Amino acid sequence: MTIKAYSIEGNGTYAQDVPAFAEALKAAGSEVVLVPGNSRVKRSMPAAALRAGAEVDTNIVDVAVAGETVTVRRWAYRQRILTAFSRAARPWVIVTDPALFGEICAKLGVTPEALPAAAAPADTRTTVNGVQAAGDGGESTIRPDAKLLFVAGAGWTKKQADGAVHLDEAAKAIKGFISKSGASLGSSKSLVDMPEAAAAFTFMSHMNQVGQTGSTPRHAKGLATCCHGEEPHVVGWRFINERRAVNLDANCGWAQGKADVLYVADAFAVMDKVNELLG
C-alpha cells in the first residue's frame, strides 16, 4: 500500500490549482493520497481528481490501514452518526478535516510534501461563441422591450369542447399571435413542464416561464390565456401595469380581483379571431 500526503497552503486560484493538483496526483503514483481540507483544496481537488482518474472523499476525520484495506471515518447527519467506509478504487484522494491532517499523517507514518501551485494556463478565460434564442433556435420569443406579454397556460393542452386535444392548433394560434403582434411570450410552469406538449410547442422553453420559479417580467400590458391566475403565477405579474385574461371559467383565479379585465370565452376562438384581425 503506497500512501502519499501533500500539505497545501496559500490561496491559489482555481485555474492554477486544478491542473497542478491533477499533475501531482498522476506523478505521485500512489494508491492513496492525503490532503488537508482547507478552502483551497475543497474548491479545486474534486475537479483535479476527476482529471487524474481518481476517486475523492472529503471531510474525513480518521484513516486506518489494515493490510491492503483503507478505512475512513466521516460524520453524517450533523455529526450525529460517525460512518466508516472503504473504497476498492485506486487512486483514492482522501481530503481530511484540516485540523486533523497532521494527526492522521503521524498515525500513518507519512510525511507531507509541500505542493506548489502552477502558473495559470493561458486559455482558461471563457469566450462567448454566440447567443441562441430560446425555443427552436429560430426567432426569439422572449422580448423584454415588447409592450405586451402574452402568457399561455396549461389549458391549451386540455380536451376542448369536442372532447379532443388540439396541440397543433394551439401552437399555431400562439405562435401566430406572437409573430404578428410582436409580443413577448410567457408560460406557466405547468405548461413548460408538460412533456406531451413539447413536440408541438417547440418555440417555448423553461426560459419563457413566468412566476413561481420563473422570471418576473415588466411590460405595459399582459394577456393571459388558459391560465388559472392563482397566486404563485400572478406574483410573476406584479410589475405588469394592465392585466387581462381569457378563460372559460368565470370563477378562475383571474376573476378574483387579479385581472383588470377577464374575458370568459374560448381562447382558441378568441385568438383565431385576433390573428385574423391582425392579418
Image: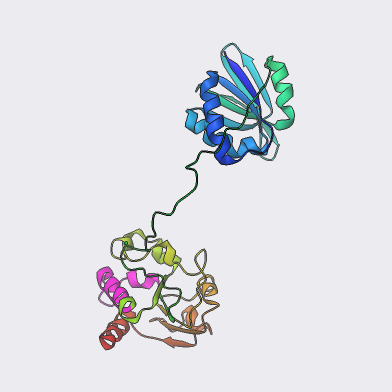
Residue 66 sits above or below residue 76 on the image: above
Residue 146 is left or right of residue 30, and the answer is left
Question: Residue at the location (40% across, 81% down)?
Answer: 247
Question: Residue at the location (52% across, 36% down)?
Answer: 47
User: Foreground: 4 or 188?
Assistant: 4
Residue 66 sits above or below residue 168 on the image: above
Quarter of the picture containing the C terminus is bottom left
Q: Position of residue 217 (x, y in %)?
A: 50, 73
Q: Is any atom of residue 160 visible in this view?
A: no
Which stretch did the figure color magenta?
152-177
Q: Position of residue 95 (x, y in %)?
A: 63, 30
| The quadrant where residue 267 appears | bottom left
Q: Position of residue 13 (x, y in %)?
A: 60, 41
Residue 179 located within the stretch drawn in magenta: no
**Tally of marks:** 0
Residue 165 located within the stretch drawn in magenta: yes
